[in-house]
Amino acid sequence: MPSPEAGFVITIDGPAASGKSSTAREVARALGIRRADSGAIYRAVTAARLRRGDPPTSWTEQSVLDAAAAVSLVPVTDSFEVRIDGVGIDAELRGPAVTAMVSRVAGMQSVRARVDSLMRTCARDVAIVVDGRDMGTAVFPGAALKIWLVADVEVRARRRSLEMRGVEPDDEEVARAASALLARDEADARQTKPATDAILVDTSRLTPSEQVDRIVALANERISSL
Ligand code: C5P
């Protein structure tokens, strides 16, 4: 199967810990195209604003937007590296300070417009897999394939704990992670909606390779019908 051409977009949206990031990465790899993670850009904008040091209670939308100017995306082999002031910042993006503030930042409409524009720029000259919450609705409404990824909250909690701690979580830890995820679902509800033409993939009872294979098969159907 040949790789798709520039302009071909696959969107993978869904709630936190539904498996978007790893699925998007593997689907892009299988198709030989790049992947761009919109959540990482919201996180980078949040990290850039946190670096100014004043307490989040004093953040205005304009001050967050100003901080967003330091965030850039640089194409690398199979993705786009997110940078602040030209420097890659992966570990900082996943830290608790960023996670605690990112939903508030993502609720700012001017910040959303800036992130949308960065995402569209990534897709300008290449075929791409993009993941986030609103890629198939607000950002790429004309995408060739739209996936809405879901999983039971307990499954999401178990996966998230395992990913963060590297050990199988006990029931108490799963319950704690589940309540954090439900709080984040609530905070992100406004921008987390499936496109009407999205295909729902429930990963609760799929292995990672099954979910990737299913989406790659759907993508190949679309590519061969172009
Ligand atoms: O996907 P990830 O958990 O890294 O996303 C971090 C945050 O960025 C989400 O909790 C959400 O607030 C925001 N986000 C968004 N729209 C997107 C992607 C992420 O609002 N398309």
Image (tube, rainbow, N blue to C red):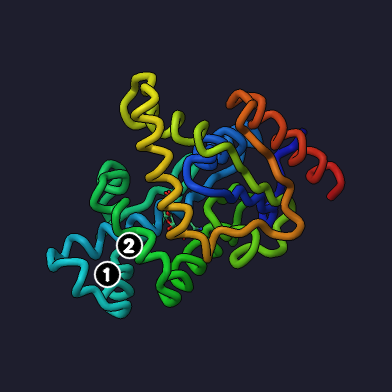
Look at the image and tell me whether residue 136 can be seen: yes
Q: Amino acid at mark 2?
A: Val
Q: Residue furthest top?
A: 168
Left or right of 160 on screen, residue 197: right
- What residue lies at 51% left-to-right and 67% top-to-bottom? 116
Which residue is more in the foreground, 19 or 155?
155
- Figure quarter occupied by ligand 1: bottom left
> Dividing the picture into quarters, in which one does residue 20 lie?
top right
**Where is residue 33 shown, x and y percent of the image?**
60, 42
Instruction: From the image, tell me which residue sits under label 1.
Output: 67
Neighbour class for label 2 at 10 Å: few (<14), some, many (≥20)? many
Q: Determine whether label 1 and label 2 are within 8 Å by CB.
A: yes
Instruction: Determine which of the numbered discs, if any, sits on residue 18 in the image.
Output: none
Is 63 located above or below residue 96 in the figure?
below
- What residue lies at 42% left-to-right and 77% top-to-bottom? 110
Neighbour class for label 1 at 10 Å: few (<14), some, many (≥20)? many
> Dividing the picture into quarters, in which one does residue 49 lie?
bottom left
Q: Amino acid at mark 1?
A: Ala
**Where is residue 63 shown, x and y percent of the image?**
26, 76
Instruction: From the image, tell me which residue sits under label 2.
Output: 45
Total numbered badges shown on the rendered structure? 2
